[in-house]
Amino acid sequence: MREIISIHIGQAGVQLGESCWQLYCLEHGIQADGTLIDDSQDKGQNSFQTFFNESNSGKYVPRAVFVDLEPNVIEELQSGTFKDLYHPDQMLTGVEDAASNYARGHYTVGRNMIDPTLDTIRRIAEQCSGLQGFLIFHSVGGGTGSGFASLLLERLSVDYGKKKPKLDFCVYPSPKISNSVVEPYNSVLSTHSLLEYTDVAFMFDNEAIYDICNKKLKIQKPKYEHLNQMIAQVISSLTASLRFEGSLNVDITEFQTNLVPYPRIHFMFCSYAPILSQATAYRTSSTVKQITSAAFESDNMMCRVDPRKGKYMACCLMYRGDVNHNEVTEALNVIKQTKKDTVSFVDWSPTGFKCGINDKPPTVVPGGDLALTDKALCLIANTTAVGEVFARMDEKFDLMYNKRAFVHWYVGEGMEEGEFNEAREDLAALEKDYEELANDDLDGEEEYGDYSGEAYDEYQ
């Protein structure tokens, strides 16, 4: 068995985790108390135990850890519909939150939580016969999601090394909407850690998903619950090949091998199709060609990125449901012929597409706004256009840091001011990495042949 441990950090990570595990349970026929609805339905097929551990009483318990520095969000989970699903020892809370401060999450308040969290992860890992890796869920803008997550990723790298991949699902700041004034500081400091300690990072932003819920699902005022359910659909499709048998499954290490050309260039954006409301679903046909074309449209993307401003380095297309190989091949040929202007690859990536096909059709939350379909596609893409996310973030960081605004709150928690400069230099180098890759210069192999993580130009 190749088990995977999910780690949910901070408010965003915990609430997103709640939506994900609700969807997993629906897909596997597991009730809110952890018992299988129909014992025969998964007989001979126990691959979903990569995510669930069977207890002595026959209940299935998520291989998940929920951590937050303040108790409110996890207390809501403990009193919710799925309160009997989770192991109580795997839900960890502190008594005071990080107050949207990276330094509190990393140095002061977070320090008290790190050892209990690592002990809990170790206990779950010891129950695994062959631990495959970790999925980490958090926001980079909050105090716990940025500071504590960075500390935990660092310690996981020390304890488990590079052989246990860490796939990171991170909510990035939106271009126009912000949850806190110091979000740019937290985001830059957190990304500095993600560069070093994660293997693949999947980027989401609330503004892009808000627009999807509003315009495509016709929800007048989307709440975080709606946004999380949308992200959960993407994560469900992305992990379907790990939980179900399929004709062409993609393993957790295959994400790295096919999507990450250089160690630092591991930030992906995700897209999902079809996104249909209940009202439009029965009036709409969804062929493999149509959902493949829709996945490359910018209004289906979960992060505010314009891929036309960059070039694709790699794409992973995760089909599920009523899909066969020939249909996928035809759909990709159509994309190559008709979308040459919008789907352009760098010259040094001649193949470009990695495909996975899983027979299990998508599931939706009962009473939700997303319509049930017989097939779906999750697109994971590595494109040079992602550089604009970091450019936006760096610009906001510079506006505040040039005046040293709010810096004293971080220094007061034991953080050195030099860490701001170090993190900003690292992101300046990352921006330059993406610019050079976008230049698509085949003769310039020596110029960017090794992305080792060193900053190229010292940030002024």
Image (cartoon, grey):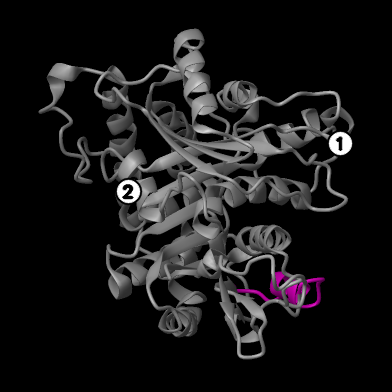
Q: In this view, does 54 lie to the left or right of 71?
A: left
Residue at the far left in the pictured view? 446
Q: In this view, does 137 lie to the left or right of 83?
A: left
- Picture residue at 75% right of the left edge, 70% below the top: 38
Magenta span has 37? Answer: no
- Disc 1 element: helix
Choose between 85 and 414: the one closer to the eye: 85
Quadrant occupied by the N terminus: bottom left
Instruction: Look at label 2 and name its amino acid.
Output: Asn
Residue 421 is tagged as 2
Label 2: how many Cα within 10 Å (few below 14, some 14–19, many 20+): some
Quadrant occupied by the C terminus: top left
* The magenta segment: 68-82
- Picture residue at 13% right of the left edge, 26% below the top: 445
Q: Please provide percent x and percent y for residue 292.
A: 57, 25
**N-terminal of the two: label 2 or label 1?**
1
Q: Name the residue under label 1.
A: 278
Q: Please provide percent x and percent y for residue 282.
A: 86, 29
Q: Please provide percent x and percent y for residue 392.
A: 49, 32
Q: Please provide percent x and percent y for residue 34.
A: 71, 76
Q: How far apart are marks 2 and 1 (CA)?
A: 49 Å
Can residue 420 be seen?
no
Instruction: Look at label 1 and name its amino acid.
Output: Gln
Label 1: how many Cα within 10 Å (few below 14, some 14–19, many 20+): some
Is residue 204 shown above or below 232?
Answer: above
Choose between 192 and 88: the one closer to the eye: 88
Which numbered disc, 2 or 1, marks the residue closer to the eye? 1
Is residue 321 shown above or below 313?
Answer: below
Residue 197 is tagged as none
- Picture residue at 53% right of the left edge, 21% below the top: 331
